[in-house]
Image: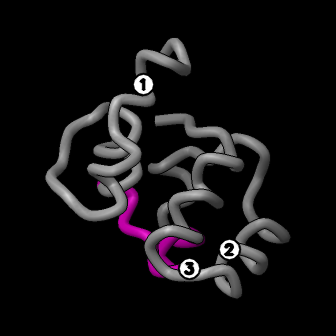
Amino acid sequence: MQIPKDLVIEFIKSKIGGGQADAAHQELPDNVDTDRDAGLLSKFGVDPQDLVGMVSGGGGGGAAGGLGGLKGKLGL
């Protein structure tokens, strides 16, 4: 699934913290592919399935649940 880098950065900020988010901002591509970039995401402590859950509105609780429902807003 393709997810805009800005959303991934917000997810990292809310889940892990600003330091990791700053580093991720430097290394992630503008559009993050949860399959292609899985290794890079794990470097920043992100499970790609958590991102998919965040965007699709699924996956329960925590930061992912708090940002859920974005899939429709993004037209995905």
Expressed as whole percent of the image width and height from the top left, the position of residue 5 reads 69, 49
Lower position in the chain sequence, tag 3 or tag 1: 3
Mark 2: amino acid: Ala
What's the distance in space between the residues labelled 3 and 1, CA to CA?
22 Å
The residue furthest left is: 60
**Residue closer to the observer: 24 or 18:** 18
Q: Is 46 placed left or right of 20 in the picture? A: left
Q: Tell me the residue at 77%/52% (across/down).
A: 29
In the figure, 70 relative to 68: above or below?
above
Query: What's the magenta region?
Result: 39-49
Lower position in the chain sequence, tag 2 or tag 1: 2
Expressed as whole percent of the image width and height from the top left, the position of residue 36 reads 54, 52
Expressed as whole percent of the image width and height from the top left, the position of residue 23 reads 76, 80
Mark 3: amino acid: Phe
Residue 71 numbered mark, or none: 1
Lower position in the chain sequence, tag 3 or tag 2: 2
Is 43 in the magenta?
Answer: yes
Q: Which quadrant of the figure has residue 10?
A: bottom right
Q: Which quadrant of the figure has residue 46?
A: bottom left
- Specify the principal SS of the magenta part: helix
What's the distance in space between the residues labelled 2 and 1, CA to CA?
21 Å
In the figure, 70 relative to 11: above or below?
above
Which residue is disc 3 drawn over?
44
**Residue closer to the observer: 37 or 6:** 6
In this view, the mark in front (3 or 1): 1
Which residue is disc 2 drawn over?
21
Q: Residues within 10 Å of mark 1 (few under 14, many from 20)?
A: some
Q: Tell me the residue at 70%/41% (across/down).
A: 31
